[in-house]
Image (tube, coloured by chain):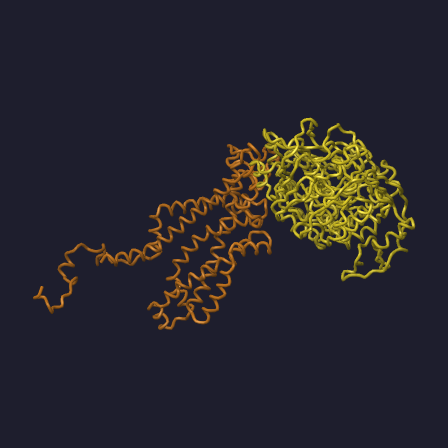
Chain colours: A yellow, B orange
Amino acid sequence: MPYDAAADTSTVTRRRVLKTAGASTVVALAGCSAGSDGGGDGESQGGQSLDPVRERAEVTVDEIQEGGTLRFGLGAGIDSFDPSYSTSAPAGNVHGLIYESLITQDAAGTVYPWLAKTWERMDVQEVEDGAYEPYMVSAETDDEGNLVADDQIIIRNPDAGEVLTVNEAPDAVEDGTYGIQYRAELHKGVTFHNGEEMTAEHVARSYEVLENSSISAQTFDSFLYAEAVDDYTVDIYGQEPDAEADSQLATTVYPMEHIEEYPNTGADPRNDLTPLGTGPFEFESYEAEQRAELSTFDDYWLDDLGLDALEWWDGPDGFPTSPVVDEVTVSIVTDDATRAAALNNNEIDLTYGLTSDTYGEYRSAEDYRLSVTNAGAYNFLQYPVTQSPWDDERIRRGVNQLIPRAQIAENIYNGYRNPAYTPLPELAADEGSANYKALVEELRPQTEQDTESATELLAEAVDDLGVETPIEATIETNTSDDRVREAELIAQVMSNTEFFDIGVETFEFTTFVQRILGPEYHQQGHIVLIGLSGTFNPGSFYDAVNSIDNFGQCCNFQRVDTPELDEIATEARFSVEAVEDPAFRGEQYDQVWRGLIEQAPNSYTVFGTNVSSLSTDYVGHNTYTFSGGILPYGLHDPTDQQVAYLDRE
Amino acid sequence: MSTDRGRIRITGFDADRVESREPLSDWTETRDTETEGRWTRAWREFRRNRSAMLGLYIVIAMSLLALFARPITIAGVTVQPISLAPYDPGAILYAQGLDVSAYEAPSLAHPFGTDGSARDVFSRVLYGGRFSLSIGFIVVLVTAAIGLVYGAVAGYYGGRVDEVMMRLLDLIFAFPGLLLALIIVAVLGKGYWELVLAFTAIGWAGYARLIRGEILKVKENEYVLAAKALGARDRRVIFRHVVPNAIAPLIVQASLSIGTVVIGVAALGFLGLGLPPSSAEWGTMLDQTRQTIVQGPGGSIPWWVTVFPGGAIFLFVMSMNLIGDGINDALDAQEGEDVARGGEV
């Protein structure tokens, strides 16, 4: 599954890697309720995380029916069939059927070994500043002054004009220079769709596919080196001690045919390069921008080994070892209303991301169901913090208290989203807070709508600054019905005070993203409203929108700079203490959230949900936490004993 | 018959017969007053056309409703204090503390219901006329004026001037109109005057070609030659003698074009390229509610959010077309009747 996430780039080295590598997706901007899979869950293996799936559908093993073709409606095109060359969260629904990773994560984010039989941290150690310098080689600079090399760069040292590439990383590791080491013992008898048998060599060399790929930035910001110890054991090294390493260091595993023969554009049927993975489905056919068809892979490893091969498995006997449907058809229908019509006309069985107006009807209709899951996502406003008067935090805090979060959740999202009184979704609460409930209680008085306090604060700031009121500004957002309504409501609530005169402007999603990522955008004084799809990693909800390292990337558009919070957030992930002591992490992150509300460079409005609408013919479906995993998770995922089947009576 | 052979006989000049027959018209020497102007006659004809008058009443009513929908303030001074619309067209009513939710069906309080953001559709439709109507009229006025001058110059001078000017026109005609408007708005950004510019940029070409054709005909008339012979300057000849006699088709075309422009504005609005999304322009309102047409299973479509703005566009454009046809008939009528009369004799 794609890591559409992990903007964990707090140190200098990471920043440099990201900046020059283009940083592709990192944390995803959510066009509507998009999201994706990825991120990490630290050390909470087997932890008691809250299930984000609302009203989870249960299936009795005896009633499961095998066979049939599941018809899935996807709301976006498939940019690439290769997870390493895709930046689209929706495409993850196809990747997840074909490809598998060393690990998997349940709906709450808990990490389980998957292609790896065991997945353990072997070592963690502090890395001194400059520890990698002795291994670096000199590199050329491009027109923009960035260091470039033919091989994947892992760490840059622009002062010396040197880089550490994948060629030098083995030397560093050999000398014991690394931050963290994981070891994967692999299952024996895992076969790829082309008949190859998976070995440690496949895993170690799969990282080669990621080199200079679409997700290289988010891979090589933490990954250092992987080597096969024996036929079924791989050691994987990270650059620094990293509390997210258990999810961040794992990779999708590719067959040698792909590693050695496929060009640097990844597997794609459009180029006659069949996607080959170890997953339960094989690629069958693809009609560009129309549909993709997949069928069961007969030699699926888990069918051969049985669920007991998974050391953590303790589910009921007879639980299916792989998805029970025979075929999956993915129909690409981008327009929400057309997709809803397709579902109503029984042309598809399952889809997600329809407009919230329709949810009530799918919930109450006899032949349909709605499956809702709290997602790792939020909508947020980002203020032009470098421009007057928005550079005054009292103005931003004032606006923050004007935002009618409860009304947004209730009136616009019909109760299918929750108000965001903290910058941290509950999904990442285990890792991201020492005590989430207490945190919400503490921050809520500053984030709940309180026109009186807001007016006081704004009056004081306006007087001090001597700015003319009403302050004129535009909220810019992407053309999605719900999002536009949200922007209009916020604009109106602000304009209802004497301090503001706010307009709304909308752009098509990709145009909008290009616009707000422009280097000059922060000087234009517009307020941005957009969605962020983070990861299971709490840091992803801080870094992407606040860290200066992500300026001009996802999702710091306004040159937000909070260096003291950056430092705490770095400590909370990239330190030995953070790796070893979850309580320390929580406390550090709590400080970050408090600081964010205080400085208010962003206002978080509502937390996202993923909502699948489906026919009752498809029984047992539950929606995954990230939209990129909705289809594969619903079909079969032993971590949550999730399986769904077709009952076409 | 043979006795008549070789005699030239002219019939119809039999004075007795002429005097005794029924008069061909009600004209008599005693009734010889000043000739009725063609515009007066056209207006009389137009008034007789019931469907055209219905269209005119509707357009006047819609214009007045739009004008008086909300107060108009210019530079801080309220020049129009009347407010027919019960609510601010942009007001999200639940944010104003009212107990109103999204998609409320039409009721006494909200005769056209409420939209997805709980705004009063009645107020929005009334107010929305301001955008569509004013853009329609402004665009047609400007384009007709440009086209008139351009076409008149090309047609009157002819020769190389005409050749060059008409090739430029061909260039403009080579672009699909709405697509060019779309590109202009995409480049300049959304907004009222951007829309006016987008439609003006292409709209004048049609008028120019039309008026040129008319002028080619009119300029051959003797009175034009006479005016020239008397030493009138070109400008005077064109605008005093040629244009007034060539303008009728342009007026017909202009009245029909208002509807086309309004549809164009609505189309751009529907494509999300017209005015900002929260504005009450009819096409934009339709775009905002497009998704409601398909509901979940068993869901009822909130028809009022699409029917009323769509109905307003329909009503206005239809009325403008009725008016256009009426004008066409009224202006053509003179010629038509003359021709018919001549044929009768």
| Position of A150 relative to B70 (above/below) | below
Q: Observer-nearest residue: A157 or A195?
A: A195
Instruction: Report which quarter residue B193 is drawn in.
Output: bottom right
Query: Horizontal and vertical percent for residue B154?
Result: 44, 67
Is residue A423 something one can see in this rendering? yes
Residue at the image position 53 percent from the left and 46 percent from the top: B283
Whether residue A574 is visible, yes or no, is no
Q: How many marks do you count on the picture?
A: 0
Rendering coords of residue A368 (x, y %): 60, 31
Q: Position of residue A285 (x, y in %)?
A: 64, 46
Viewed as shown, does residue B57 lie left or right of A402? left
The quadrant in which residue A138 appears is: bottom right
Q: Within the image, what quadrant is residue A301 found in?
A: top right
- Depth order, front residue of B178/B44: B178
Q: Position of residue A597 (x, y in %)?
A: 76, 40
The C terminus of chain A: image quadrant: top right
Residue that extends furthest to the right in the rendered view of this protein: A175
- B237 shown above or below A579: below
Quadrant for the N terminus of chain A, please. Answer: top right
